[in-house]
Amino acid sequence: MNEKQEATRVNGIDMNVLGKTVQAIKDDPELGRCRFRVRNKWLDANHNRTRITGFYGAKEEHEHKQTFELHADEPPILAGGDEGANPVEHLLNALASCVTTSIVAHAAVRGIVIEELESELEGDLDLRGFLGLDPDVPKGYTDIRVKFKVKTDEENLKKLKKLAQFSPVYNTLTNGANVDVQIEAK
Amino acid sequence: MNEKQEATRVNGIDMNVLGKTVQAIKDDPELGRCRFRVRNKWLDANHNRTRITGFYGAKEEHEHKQTFELHADEPPILAGGDEGANPVEHLLNALASCVTTSIVAHAAVRGIVIEELESELEGDLDLRGFLGLDPDVPKGYTDIRVKFKVKTDEENLKKLKKLAQFSPVYNTLTNGANVDVQIEAK
């Protein structure tokens, strides 16, 4: 017990907290069900704002300690005012952050110490799809490349690549999700 | 020509700029190819930061007018410090902003005036997938629901729903993308 308390953090993550969460979900799988939420408001032209205040998980509502506010816009050549990253850049951010967290957390659980970790992502998108100029051109990203540079023992690198596959955003992007869109009058 | 200049903005979007972009890509499809990029750095535990400085499109590099910085973290029950939206919340933000922009811009092109537009999104995610507790549980979002409330003429509502399908993020999420992850030593 004392030993566990001493070695409580790996890669900065409190292993006691993470361990308790994992054990609780093992004991009661229902605790694993989460529902994440955002609210978005169109401001003007291509500029809109998202607010994130809380989520449902472990059978109850949780408030974030602050309201997160995110802005999206388009650059001038896409008829925007460049007041925020554009939506497809936000998508790459979601992927980058998720794969990073997945690698770091799963490495911690396995006792793999990471000193530094950085990534560069790029995604290919042909605007002819979005603009409806050619129905044969995909509207979304076709290929996304994620390149990590990690400072850790050489022997860990191959293991880390496998850990990336636990990422929820990676899995959503590669497997797809059901997305239901409803529109009603305000 | 004068008439066009008078009616230059619909839903706040400069139709001359958008029209020129569309015409240029029609004339030279190669101009439509874009490559968006982000760089991410792990800071500590579940906290990481993305920076977005520019992108490639219309056959050249473009710098954003400012560097966009986005933080991701996890809430306390997921062993984080809650210093930013978490990655799967960022994913919902990407979807919300993209479908919003797609509806507003495509409506503008069709002369559909939108007065107000808001959305609420929620996504279902079972942590047992991410945590590796059950290989049969999907690691990503299974279902995402997007609910828009729009102030516009009643007759436009059905048309707007179809316009959502032009969204690149919506298409990436529903169709999936190839995601290649590489890891090398730093």
Image (spheres, coloured by chain):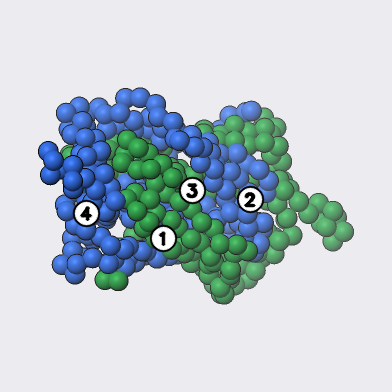
Chain colours: A blue, B green
- The chain to which mark 2 is attached is A
* Local secondary structure at mark 1: strand
For discs 1 and 2, the disc positioned in front in the rendered view: 1
Q: Chain of mark 1?
A: B
Q: Is residue A17 above or below residue B106?
A: above
Position of the N terminus of chain A, as image quadrant, is top left
Residue A183 against residue A86 in the figure, above or below: above
Label 1 – label 3 distance at C-alpha:
16 Å
Q: Amino acid at mark 1?
A: Asn
Disc 1: which residue: B40
User: Residue A108: horizontal and vertical position, in percent?
Assistant: 22, 51
Q: Left or right: A186 with respect to A110? A: right
Residue drawn 72% across the image and 48% down it:
B12
* Identity, as a three-letter code, of the amino acid under mark 2: Asn
Image-based side of B180 in relation to B31, left or right: left
Question: According to the image, label 4 marks what residue?
Answer: A107
Q: Could you classify mark 2 by the number of other residues whose Cα lies within 10 Å: few (under 14), some (14-19), or many (20 or more)?
A: many
Residues at circles 1 and 3 in contact by the CB criterion of under 8 Å: no
Q: Say which mark, if any, is on residue A46.
A: 2
Residue position for label 3: B94
Q: Nearer the viewer, mark 2 or mark 4?
A: 4
Image-quadrant location for residue A159:
bottom left
